[in-house]
């Protein structure tokens, strides 16, 4: 009898709690209490959820404490430009036969120019005639210097001087040639004005056939 009364009292208490709190919430709370005591999270309730349409901030991930700051990569500095030093042209030494042929050709020119009477020439024509002979002799001397054993610095200076001499010889050749053609034309009976036309015509022939 006492046992039956105790059972009825327990059932009545449970029914009363269920009516007051709701059976699911009541028993869920009991489970949540058990889960909490076991070290796990309780059941998710509707009140714990974020409101509809609400935006949540993204989680912040802290950088590792030992992470080094990023290093800026810079373009390599350009190397300073160094002015190029012109290389001294390599000299190919001439053979003895070539040297003799060169000197013989130069002597032929000097002998021919020296055989011409310059007394009847004008001052400028005579001066050009004499300068040409002098420059031809200077070029021979420069050629011999290049054939000798000299330093690269001296060789560069001799080459520069020879280039200047060659340019002067070219200009003097033109002047002396025209003057001699004019003298020959006049000696053959051509008038002075007509001799200029002869000089011009021969110069055009030479330029066209060189």
Image (cartoon, rainbow, N blue to C red):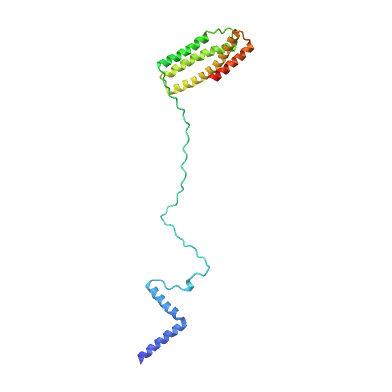
Residue 47 in percent (x, y) is at 49, 73
| 106 in relation to 77, above or below | above
Tell which of 103 and 73 is nearer to you.
103
Residue positioned 40% across, 86% down in the render? 11
Residue 16 in percent (x, y) is at 44, 85
In which quadrant of the rendered image does the N terminus lie? bottom left
Q: Is residue 19 left or right of residue 118?
A: left
Q: Is residue 71 left or right of residue 191?
A: left
| 46 in relation to 80, above or below | below
Q: Is residue 204 left or right of residue 36?
A: right
Residue positioned 57% across, 12% down in the render? 181
Tell which of 15 and 159 is nearer to you.
159
Residue 36 in percent (x, y) is at 40, 73
Residue positioned 44% across, 83% down in the render? 18
Tell which of 184 and 43 is nearer to you.
184
Query: Splitting the image into 4 quarters, where does residue 197 fall?
Result: top right
Residue positioned 44% across, 19% down in the render? 146
Residue 91 in percent (x, y) is at 43, 22
Query: Splitting the image into 4 quarters, where does residue 8 fall?
Result: bottom left
Q: Farthest residue in the bottom direction?
A: 1
């Amino acid at each position: 009898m006492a046992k039956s009364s105790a059972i009825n009292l327990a059932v009545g208490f449970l029914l009363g709690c269920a009516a007051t709190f709701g059976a699911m919430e009541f028993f869920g709370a009991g489970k949540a209490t058990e889960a909490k005591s076991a070290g796990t999270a309780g059941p998710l309730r509707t009140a714990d959820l974020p409101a509809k349409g609400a935006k949540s901030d993204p989680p912040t991930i802290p950088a590792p404490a030992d992470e080094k700051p990023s290093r800026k990569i810079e373009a390599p500095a350009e190397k300073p430009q160094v002015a190029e030093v012109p290389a001294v042209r390599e000299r190919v030494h001439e053979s003895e036969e070539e040297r003799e042929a060169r000197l013989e050709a130069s002597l032929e020119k000097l002998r021919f120019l020296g055989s011409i009477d310059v007394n009847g020439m004008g001052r400028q024509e005579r001066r050009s005639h004499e300068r040409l002979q002098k420059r031809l002799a200077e070029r021979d001397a420069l050629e011999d210097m290049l054939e000798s054993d000299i330093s690269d610095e001296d060789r560069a200076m001799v080459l520069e001087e020879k280039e200047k001499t060659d340019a002067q010889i070219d200009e003097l050749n033109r002047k002396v040639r025209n003057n001699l053609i004019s003298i020959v034309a006049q000696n053959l009976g051509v008038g002075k004005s007509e001799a200029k036309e002869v000089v011009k015509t021969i110069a055009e022939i030479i330029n066209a056939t060189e």
